Image (tube, helix red, strand yellow):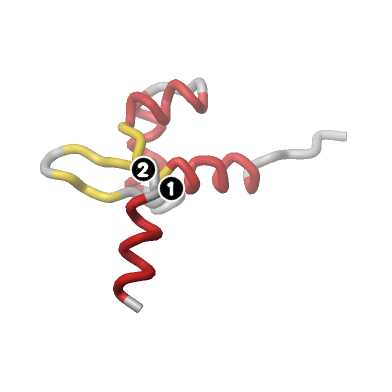
Amino acid sequence: MAASSSSDMSDAKFLTVAEVASVMRVSKMTVYRLVHNGELPAVRVGRSFRVLEEDVNRYLRESFFDAG
């Protein structure tokens, strides 16, 4: 089981907070708030955070609002 999960993670693409902010077209502070509130999963690497691209895409899909 450990071998399959490690191979899954080797294909994962991690984004910096600045990259996530750029993709979402929001400020870095907004991304930090999402991470600290637990709305966007992140991994702490030293003093910075990394977010899986897949988690950003999932967050955006689940956040769509139908105003009609």
Side of 64 where 42 appears, left or right? left
Residue farthest to the right, as pictured? 68
Q: Quadrant of the N terminus?
A: bottom left
Q: At 39% from the left edge and 48% from the top edge, which residue is drawn?
A: 12
**Label 2 near label 1: C-beta < 8 Å?**
yes
Q: Nearer the viewer, residue 13 or 51?
A: 13
Instruction: Give residue 25's position: percent from left, percent from top.
Output: 51, 21
Q: Which residue is mark 2?
A: 51
Q: At 81% from the left edge and 34% from the top edge, which residue is drawn?
A: 67
Instruction: Give residue 6's position: percent from left, percent from top.
Output: 31, 63
Q: CA distance from mark 1 to mark 2?
A: 8 Å
**Residue 40 — which label?**
1
Q: At 33% from the left edge and 52% from the top edge, which residue is drawn?
A: 10
Q: Amino acid at mark 2?
A: Val
Instruction: Give residue 13's position: percent from left, percent from top.
Output: 38, 41
Q: Quadrant of the C terminus?
A: top right
Q: Secondary structure at mark 2?
A: strand
Residue farthest to the bottom, as pictured? 1
Q: Amino acid at mark 1?
A: Leu
